[in-house]
Amino acid sequence: MRDIDDQVLVEGTEEPVYEHFLSKGWTDGLPIIAPTIERVEAFLAEATVAADEVIGVIPPQWAALTAQKLAVNAVMAGCKPEYTPVLVAAIKAMCEPVFNLYGVQATTNPVGPMLVVNGPVGRRIGLKADTGALGPGWRANVTIGRAIRLVLTNVGGGSPGNMDRATQGMPGKLFFCFAENEEASPWEPFHIEKGYSADTSTVTVIGASGSLNLIDQGSLDAEGLLKTFASALSVIGTNNIYFGGDPVLLISPEHADTLSKGGLKKRDVKEYLFDSACTPIERFSRDNVENVLKKRRPHLFEKGMPGCIRPIDKPDDLIVLVVGGPGKHSVFVPTFGVNRSVTRIIS
C-alpha cells in the first residue's frame, strides 16, 4: 500500500483499508466504508455539489474543507448523498466565530458538536426524533454525526490526544445528531421560536458536554417536574455555572404534556428555571469564587457578592426542545459555555 498525493492505494479487501486508515489516525476507531474514487464521485454526483466548492475552513489546522473532502468523510461514515445539505449547513454554522470551533476542537473539556434538525428535511431523510432519538440504531442520526466528527479530525486536525485535549473525552463526540419531535410537542418548534417559517428546515449546532438523564415518574404537576429540572441545571461543576452559555433541556413528550396541561408555555418553563436554578454562593469553594467565577463571569459581581449563581444570564439562554418517545425521562445537556449555538437554514 502507498499514498499518492491526495489518493491512497491499498491492495486487498476493506480490512486492509481500515487498518491503514486506523494507523494514520483517519478514523474514529470504528470500521469505515472505503472512500474509493468511484464511491466519492458517485456521492458528489448524486449530492449535486461541485467537488472544488469550499464549505468552510476547519480549525485548528485551518484547512479548507471542499465538497470533495466532505464527500470522502461522508462516504467513510456511511452517509447517503441526500444528507449532504444537512452536513453543509452544519459545517457552515460551526465555522461562524460565535461557535468558537477552535475552542471546541482543542479544549480539555469533553465537548463536541450536537446537531438539532428542525423542519421537513428531518422527516424526508429519516432523522429520528422520537424513541431513541439520541441513538444508537438510526442511520441518518449516526452517520451525519459521525461524518462531522471525521471532518473535524481529518480536515481540522482535531485528533484525540493531539489537538483534541479532552481529559476523558465523551461518547457524544462520535455522533450527536437528532431531530426535534415537533409532532409530539405542545409548543412551537425551535426553528419557529428562532423566527423561521414552519416549512423551512434548519440545523442548530451546539457545543454539548455530555448528557444527564432526568427521571421523574412521580411528579403529577408542572411545579413538581420543574423542581427536578431546576436541580439538574444547578449542578456545580458544569461549564455553564462557570461560563454561562446556552445549555439544553431535552424534554420528553410525556413531561412536555405535564407542563402544557399545567398551563405552561415554553417561555414559562424558561422563566421558572431561570428563577429557580440558582446555586447558593456558599456552596462554592472560596477558590472557585475568587479565581474562577469572578474572572469568568465578572458581571455577576458588579453589585457585590451575589446570593446565588445561575447557569444562564437570561431565560432565553436556555434551549428547550421536545425530543424522544414514551417514558418520563428528560435530558439535561450542559454546554461548553465558551461559545454559543448557531442555527442555519438547510438549503
Image (cartoon, helix red, strand yellow):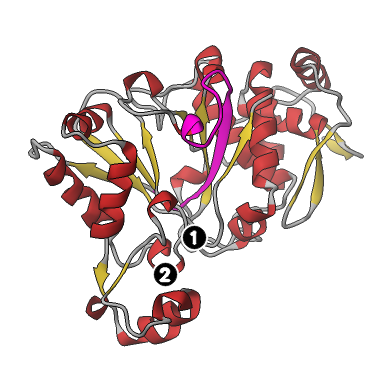
**Residue at position x 75%, y 27% from top?**
71
Q: Is residue 245 shown above or below 298?
A: above
Image position of 171 with respect to 69: above or below: below
Are the residues at dot 2 and dot 1 in contact (C-beta closer than 8 Å)?
Answer: yes
* Residue 175 painted magenta: no
Which of the 4 image quadrants contains residue 89? top right
Q: Quadrant of the N terminus?
A: top right
Residue 325 placement, left or right of 48: left
**Amino acid type for the residue under numbered disc 2:** Tyr
On whether residue 201 falls in the magenta region, the answer is: yes
Q: Quadrant of the C terminus?
A: top right
On the question of residue 25 being in view, the answer is: no
Q: Residue furthest right?
A: 5
Q: List x then y, in percent, for residue 252.
A: 28, 32
Q: Residues within 10 Å of mark 2 (few under 14, many from 20)?
A: many
- Asked which quadrant contains residue 168, the reply is bottom left
For image coordinates 62% across by 60% down, the residue present is 103
Q: Which residues are magenta?
A: 191-210
The residue that appears at 53% across and 17% down in the rendered structure is 120
Is residue 157 something one can see in this rendering?
A: yes
Where does the image place residue 305, in percent across and percent down from the top left?
32, 84
Q: Determine whether the residue tagged by mark 1 lies in a helix, strand or loop.
A: loop
Q: Which residue is mark 2?
A: 242
Taking the image as shown, residue 20 lies to the left or right of residue 250, namely: right
Based on the displayed image, in which of its 4 quarters is residue 47 positioned? top right
As measured in the structure, the alpha-carbon distance from the residue carrying label 2 to the one carrying label 1 is: 8 Å
Q: Which residue is mark 1?
A: 337
